[in-house]
Each structure stands twice: as structure tokens, then as C-alpha cells.
Image (cartoon, helix red, strand yellow):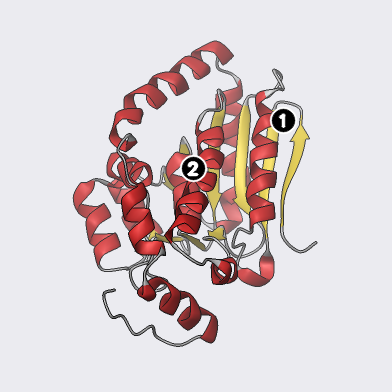
Amino acid sequence: MSDEVALRIEGALAHLTISNVDSRNALTWRMYDQLAAACDTVAGNPELRVLLLRGDGAAFAAGTDIGQFADFRDGEDGVRYEHRVAQVLDRLAGLGIAVVAVVEGPAVGAGLALVAICDLVIATPDAVFGAPVARTVGNCLPPVTIGRLYASLGRSATLSMLLTARLVSADEAHRAGLVHEVVDRTELDPRVSEIVADICRCAPLSIAAIKEADRRLAAPSGQVEFDDVFRACYGSSDFHEGVQAFLDKRPAVWKGR
């Protein structure tokens, strides 16, 4: 299969690779299921200290595979989709070990949501971040993801990025606080290894306690009812037009209904 999320374990380090190269690592339903299963495996292994999350090839992850949205018939399909993805993201966010994202190329849409969950983000200079759904497909982001972006990028930078549907460079994301460090590709793997070694020297229970404190502090910002908004966006004519326009490789014609 060309679409997969592959888990490889080396001692205290878990490598999780998002791979759907022909679609810039866009996530399919199968890949979301594999990501959830990988999180369960990691959570059940007490020897692990760090999870490295990265994309295969020249992209981190270009969101959800838009072709799957063509089967959506009404707003309830959108609600079910958002709940399904939220469950997967919650599993990743709930891990008691450090989660480090290594980002090369685009991390957009669901790729950005994954990055926002990670504890540390190491990016190459060509990395870009964003969720241009207002320009591309016409759906929406869940409050919990926007809340995580507020915490890392700041409210002003987050709203500017989302409302203008623009992509943020690695340097801009670093200045704002989403990215921990920008590293040239030639130095990337050695630097990541250094960071992993630093984390692995720390007490596992201390790391788990820091992760749990962060999770509890961040939780209130996303605990709002939003199914009515999901229903309105995914059930709209604009959403169906956005999906078809994306698949046709043409600009969408928005009607606001």
C-alpha cells in the first residue's frame, strides 16, 4: 500500500513515519487508524522515552486526503470525521513520553494539527505551516486545534494565518514559538539525535509529569461545543464546491451557503 503510517522501534526511541508520497503524505482513513494503533503500541511500551514523528520524503503531511471528502453527503459526515480525527489526535497528545516532530516541507491542515500537539518541533528552512481551508476546501478547524495554535503561535499570528489562508515559513514559526529550532537539512539528523539523547537522560516520571501538566493546562481552551459549526460547514454547498474544485485543480467559486 502506498499510504501508511509506519512505526519502528529502536531501543528507547520510536520512529513514526507518515507516508503517502504521491499526495505529499496526505492522511487517508487507513493512515489515521494506523496512527491510533501506533500510539497504543507506544503507550504500552514502558521502555520508550521519545517518539519521533516525521514525513516520508519532501513533506511532513499535507492534511487529510481531500479525495475522501467526495463521499460526504451532509453535515453529519463532517461531524463524524472531526470526532474521528479528534480521537486520534487525543491519543497522540496523551502519550507520556516526549513527542518530537521533524518537519521538512509542508505541514498543513491535519499536518499542522499534528505539529501543534508535539512537544518539540524541529524544522528545516523549507518547512511551511498553515491550514488554508478557507481558500481550498471550505471546511473548518476544531477549537482544540486553534487553542493549541494560540498557545504556540499566539492568537494574533494564528488568526492572521487562518483568516488569510496563508502559509507561515519555518523562520516565522520559529520566531512565534511553534518551532523549537530551524536546522539545515545537512545537520538535521545529528541535531535530532542530540535532542533525543538529552531527553533520554531525563527521569521518565519527570517527563511524564511535565506532559500531564501541559495536557491539563491546555485542556480547557478546546472544551467547547462545536458540532453545530461542523455541521454547517461540512453540510454546505460551498464545502462540496471546494472539494470538487480541489479535485479539478481549479479555484473554488464560493457562494456563502
* 15 vs 148, nearest the viewer: 148
Residue 49 in picture, x, y percent from top left: 63, 24
Q: Please state the total of marks drawn on the protein image.
A: 2
Residue 3 in picture, x, y percent from top left: 72, 60
Task: Say which quadrant the N terminus sits in.
Answer: bottom right
Q: Along the horizontal axis of the image, is 158 left or right of 3?
A: left
Q: Amino acid at mark 1?
A: Thr
Q: Along the horizontal axis of the image, is 117 left or right of 41?
A: left
Crowding around mark 1 (Cα neighbors within 10 Å: few <14, some 14 to 19, many 20+) is few
Q: Amino acid at mark 2?
A: Ala
Among the 4 quarters of the image, the one containing residue 193: top right
Residue shown at 72% from the left, 22% from the top: 45
Q: Which mark is residue 71?
A: none
Disc with the residue nearer the chain's start (2 vs 1) = 1
Secondary structure under tag 1 reads helix
On screen, 215 above or below 194?
Answer: above
Q: Along the horizontal axis of the image, is 224 left or right of 77?
A: left
Among the 4 quarters of the image, the one containing residue 225: top left
Residue labelled with disc 1: 41
Residue shown at 76% from the left, 64% from the top: 2
Query: Can residue 78 be seen in this snapshot?
Result: yes
* Residue found farthest to the left: 156
Residue labelled with disc 2: 86
On screen, 244 above or below 174?
Answer: below
* 173 vs 247, nearest the viewer: 247
Residue 43 in picture, x, y percent from top left: 65, 25
Crowding around mark 2 (Cα neighbors within 10 Å: few <14, some 14 to 19, many 20+) is some
On screen, 156 above or below 133?
Answer: above
Distance between mark 2 and mark 1 Cα atoms = 18 Å
